[in-house]
Amino acid sequence: MKVLIVGSGGREHAIATAVAKSKRVSKIYCAPGNAGIAAQAECVPIGAMEFDKLVAFAKEKEIDFTIIGMDDPLVGGIVDKFEAEGLKVFGPRKNAAILEGSKAFSKDLMKKYHIPTAGYETFDDPKKALEYLETAKMPIVLKADGLALGKGVLICNTLEEAKAGVKEIMEDKKFGSAGNNMVIEEFMTGREVSVLSFVDGKTIQIMSSAQDHKRAGDGDTGLNTGGMGNFSPSPFYTAEVDDFCKKYIYQATVDAMAAEGRPFTGVIFFGLMLTPEGPKVLEYNARFGDPEAQVVLPRMKNDIIDVMEACVEGRLDQIDLQFEDNACVCVVLASDGYPVSYEKGFPIKGFEKFEGKDDYFCYHAGTAFNDKGEIVTNGGRVLGITATGPDLKTARAKAYEAAEWIEFENKYMRHDIGKAIDEA
């Protein structure tokens, strides 16, 4: 079987690593891929948004199965394009990917189908948003409606901050057209948990829980990023929480999308807040999280192709989804200055220390080859240093140990990924 993966980050490297384990797969391509993915797949210089070129490539190489890793092509309708050409592809169609593509859509969906979430209002006029804030309770959350690389959310503690946030999102267009509309949401307190799931349009199967660290600095300080590290499972995702979510959130979301004529096939990422009133949905994503994929996929026992194919063919109910009884921690090595400005092109050393180890992973997020054939930094998030262990504390210690194996100029990381484990 020949497989094409669309994307270029740490998530796609984690997917490629899982696909490479499948005995059914003989050849992997990745478009456009990165320097790490190149060790497992043949990388092809086609961008994730070049739909016609990707379809033509899939036909030319007689690709049996395509996996879409990224949000932009999913929201843009890449699955519809592939399906129209009779190509088998994993991911939601455009009308279902709106679950992530529009926060206003997803909030309205939850409201209509009584899925627990924070109270909110939606605005397309900054003046009306400012009027609403005058009587709103602080702190409050502002969200750009569209895709913003995980950064389009502002938590505002004062009215002045909130007013500045409206200007930033809706008038200054800091997040581009994602800020044409905006959701203003009540601030929820509690612990955040991420839960990934496989969906075939009607059946949902839950993967292991995970917990992300979005802020750039230790102690959850600094700007929001795409994610500075992760661990799985979350000790705060208890059996009681799981029961509640299965009853009121997971299947309810799948059923709601089907009822709206938007059946969802692929991965739904549930961002949850465990509030004093019970779990509530913070956000949906329509694909694997990054770096959630890096800590969840290494723990999955199943052949990923078997599971994804079952989703596409509508027979997920026949899959016994299983995960190892262990733990996994990912520490992101970033370029100093991320997520604002940073230099790239620095050679990276230390990869050889990961060779032959099946409990350590070095997932490439922003890497490339230079003209000397060296692997160099090529992004804000450079590598996801990941380790498994019998428990979270062991996995965390191993991940930080391995983070020291890698060297490059302007290397930056948080030192408290998984610190919440100590409080569990």
Image (cartoon, grey):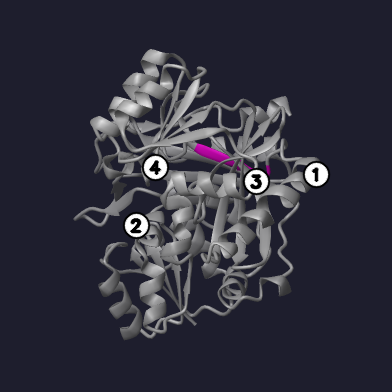
Q: Is 147 on the left or on the right of 319, as rendered?
A: left
* Quarter of the image that includes the C terminus: top right
C-alpha span from label 3 to label 1: 22 Å
- Label 2, label 4: how far apart the Cα atoms are: 33 Å
Judge from the rendering whether residue 242 lies leftward or rightward of residue 357; answer left or right. Answer: right
Which residue does the numbered mark 2 point to in the structure image?
35
The residue lying toward the viewer, choosing from 142 and 72, is: 142
Going from N to C along the chain, the mark reached first, 3 or 1, is 3
Sequence-first tag of 4 and 3: 3
Q: Give whichever of 360, 228 is nearer the camera.
A: 228
Query: Tag 3: residue type?
Result: His
Please tell me which residue is depicted at 71% across the width and 47% down the height of the picture: 245
Q: Which residue is mark 1?
A: 239
Q: Which residues are magenta?
A: 229-233
Q: Position of residue 283 (x, y in %)?
A: 53, 43
Q: Secondary structure at mark 4?
A: loop
Please state which of the two labelled residues, at mark 4 or mark 3, is closer to the viewer.
3
- The tag on residue 179 is none
**Does label 3 or label 2 sit earlier along the sequence?**
2
Judging by the rendered image, the residue that carries numbered circle 3 is 114
Secondary structure, mark 2, is loop
Q: Is residue 2 left or right of residue 325?
A: left
State the image quarter where residue 189 is shown.
top right
